[in-house]
Amino acid sequence: MTLLVFLLVAIPAFANEKPDDFTAYAGSASCLDCHRADYDLWAQSHHALAERSLRTATDQAAFVPARSIKHGDETTAFQATNGIFQIVTLGPDSNRQPYRVERVFGHDPLIQFLTPFPGGRYQVHEASYDPKSNQWFYVYGDDFRNPGEYGHWAGRGMNWNSQCAECHNTRLHKNYDAATDSYHTTLAEMGVGCEACHGPLKAHVEWRNAHTNTTLLDPTVFKLSPARIVGLCGSCHSRNTDLTENFKPGDSFYDHYALEILDGDKRWYADGQIKDEDYEFEAFLGSKMYQDGVTCLDCHNPHSYKNTLAGNDLCMRCHIGGYPKAPKIDPVTHKHDCKSDCIDCHMPVTVYMQRHPRRDHGFTIPDPLLTKELQIPNACNRCHADKTADWSLKYADEWYGTNMNRPTRERARWIAAGENREAGAQTKLIGLLADTNQPAYWRAVAATFLERWATEPATQTALLSQLKNGHPLVREKVVRSLEPALVDTNVLAALQPLLNDPLRNVRVAAAWVLRATVDMQGKAGQDLQRMLDLEADQPIGQFEEAILLLSRQQPAEALGHLKKTTAWDKLSPPFLCTQAQVQDQLGQLPEALKTLDQAEAGVPDDPHIPYVRAMILARNGRNDEARAAAKRALEIQPNFKSAWELLQRMPSKSPQPIYQTR
């Protein structure tokens, strides 16, 4: 069901746009004369205030009078010196000094400040300000980030150009220069302006000014379909990998982004509820609401972004009866003695960044039984935190009885079984993948978990059968899950046509899976390289470039990228272990062991580091040292199967290599 709310967007005017050419943009102020009511709603919205320049009258309350806060052993101070607002804190070289703040991020419930750095960078401070309480706090809570670490405010994890800018501004180009490791970032307008959602409007303004007394339809704009509206919102309200840095209102989401979804990293709960900072899009894609045609603008005003109705009135607009896909709800009998609103039960709140409460958009049903079985939180105990899951389960069973035995409960169990590699999970996930009554999101989730069994005939057949699925998200995840089965020539042949898929997310996935042989000058190869180039300013981008080169038997070239990776993120075991393995492959054993020393010094409790050390030492015939390293891995993680197998395979005297990188 949809209420047919449309969005007018500009006819694309981007085809020949150069990075610094914003001549097709008119700016939000140009909308004021004709659309004053909408403009006024937007001007006070979180979108309009997503980023702005510093305003003395508005922002001085955070810095005057001077004050400080303590975090661990460190103290951060906030002050105004000669009219310049400053944050006094540890910088990248552990030097405590004042840093001038120049821009402002966010509005409510928290504000972050940006400091200019060399190389065209802006860095986002971890010390954040709550304007309602007039308090400073650390956005990471008790997680202390040391200078030099990736996640420290001066590190690449808190770099504005790469991590934040695109979604807080209008038509932004990062413009990273890999040769100089610098940025020349440009944008059409600071903040999320009108043209961020409507596209460039200069032609529209000019046409309207030339046709002031006409009822003709403006040929420079067109209506955006409901599906494209959701994708437009999802371009920022999701966890994704940007494939192009060129998404435009009206484009397919999947032609520009590879969406992160529920997988083995446990960033979502098995029923789809958000766990990590996942934003709203993925949970919404998996919801019954989305499946039945509801879009963002059915509930949110497109200019203020607030709910169109207050409280339960918003939900009852549809659930009062008369809509075939919206079951009629009597609020009194439905919630029994519970005093909460609909959204308190079906859109529970999680607080992120210490002060930012966000509602889950999966519209899930609270299920205390899943709490008992799988530790999935339920809305009942979120409110009644002093009660047990058994207490909540008693009332759920009394009030709703067998209605709680719904398909979504079983689906959550299947996903959890897949996460834990339980016997029988494979069969259930194959069924979920094939179920056309399920949302595409959940079929894609099933495909993702089936990667663990991709070499088994039944799973392989199920995955191959979905390579022509009508939804690009399903196709992409199926392609990625078939990578372990590439030794089968039938799989290899079946994946080749996906290099020419109409959607870029699928082409990039196919190019990555086939990276050892893909033509990098072909369409899919160029798409893949474009994505890697966009990520070249981040450790993960350098690491992926290295993996591509290793797959193409170019270890010496890969090592250069790995060294950048580990210089930019000094505490990531996968990065450091891979670098050590490549160094060993190139005959650089002392350097490899030194890299592992660095890894163990930074992350002493990770069993994979001594395990990789054991493999490298055994490969070089140093079996006694290898055994000691393998035993160290088992001390950290006694059930580390690979370490046990390594010990069992290790010869007592013979120095035969037992491991070799690609």
Image (spheres, rainbow, N blue to C red):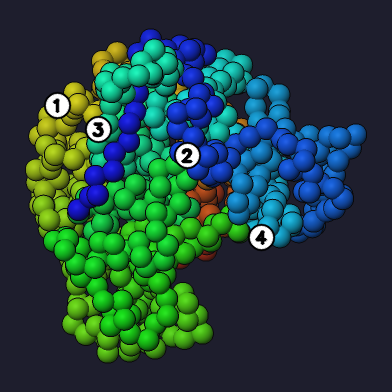
Of pointers 4 and 2, the one earlier in the residue sequence: 2
Instruction: Please give the count of numbered marks on the rendered protein.
Output: 4
- Which of discs 3 and 2 lies nearer the camera? The answer is 2
Disc 3, disc 2: CB below 8 Å? no
- Dot placed on the residue nearer the N-terminal end, 1 or 2: 2
Amino acid type, callout 1: Pro
Taking the spot 24% from the left edge, 68% from the top edge, the residue there is 320
- x and y percent of residue 13 in the render? 36, 16
Q: Distance between the residues labelled 1 and 2?
A: 50 Å
Question: Eyeballing the image, is 295 above or below 490?
Answer: below
Q: Earlier in the sequence, mark 4 or mark 3?
A: 4
Badge 2 is on which residue? 37
Pointer 3 with pointer 1, Cβ within 8 A: no
Q: Name the residue under label 1.
A: 497
State whether residue 572 appears in this view.
no
Q: Is residue 146 left or right of residue 253?
A: right
Mark 1 Cα shell of 10 Å, populated few (<14), some (14-19), many (≥20):
few
Q: Do the residues labelled 4 and 2 touch (CB within 8 Å)?
A: no
Of 67 and 372, the residue lying toward us: 67
Horizontally, is 169 left or right of 149 in the view? left
| In the rendered image, the vertical position of residue 22 relative to residue 109, given as above or below | above
Q: What element carries label 2?
A: helix
Tag nearer the camera, 3 or 1: 3
Identify the mark at residue 506; answer none if there is no mark. Answer: 3
